Amino acid sequence: MDNELQKYYEDRFSMMATQGWLDLMDDIDNMIGPLNNISAIPGEKELQFKKGEMSILTWLKTLKQASELAYEGLNEKNL
């Protein structure tokens, strides 16, 4: 892995180790619950909007795990 990519992941993991990141994950958990109720959605346009919101929140929620897996995969390639 080159130095630039190594720094990218180190910076990302450093950010994810902060209290601010943990607070953001708590906020996301609190947002997902109410958004994940399709019975309150009046129409297709609103459904598509909620789908987009959920997609972004899910991406953020799984970013740490996805980053860890990618980093491990890159390190295994370099062995």
Image (cartoon, rainbow, N blue to C red):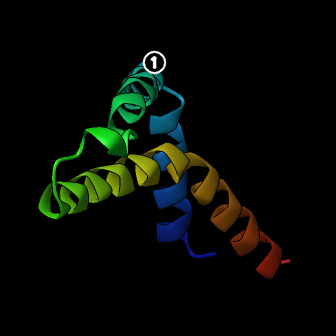
The number of numbered badges drawn on the structure is: 1
Within 10 Å of the Cα at label 1, are there few (<14), some (14-19), or many (20+) other Cα atoms? few
Q: From the viewer's perspective, is 46 left or right of 64?
A: left
Relative depth, front residue between 70 and 27: 27
**x%, y% of residue 51?**
31, 57
Residue, far right: 79
Relative depth, front residue between 66 and 42: 42
**x%, y% of residue 74?**
70, 73
Quadrant location, the C terminus: bottom right
Quadrant location, the N terminus: bottom right
40 in relation to 9, above or below: above
9 in relation to 31, above or below: below
**x%, y% of residue 10?**
54, 50
Residue at the image point whose x is 35% and y is 46% from the top: 38
Relative depth, front residue between 41 and 27: 41
Q: Is residue 68 visible?
A: yes
Residue at the image point whose x is 26% and y is 38% from the top: 40
Residue, far bottom: 77
Residue beneath disc 1: 19
69 in relation to 65, above or below: below
Residue at the image point whose x is 74% and y is 71% from the top: 73
For mark 1, give the secondary structure.
helix
Q: Is residue 78 visible?
A: no
Q: Amino acid at mark 1?
A: Gln
Relative depth, front residue between 61 and 10: 61
Residue at the image point whose x is 34% and y is 30% from the top: 34
**x%, y% of residue 50?**
25, 51
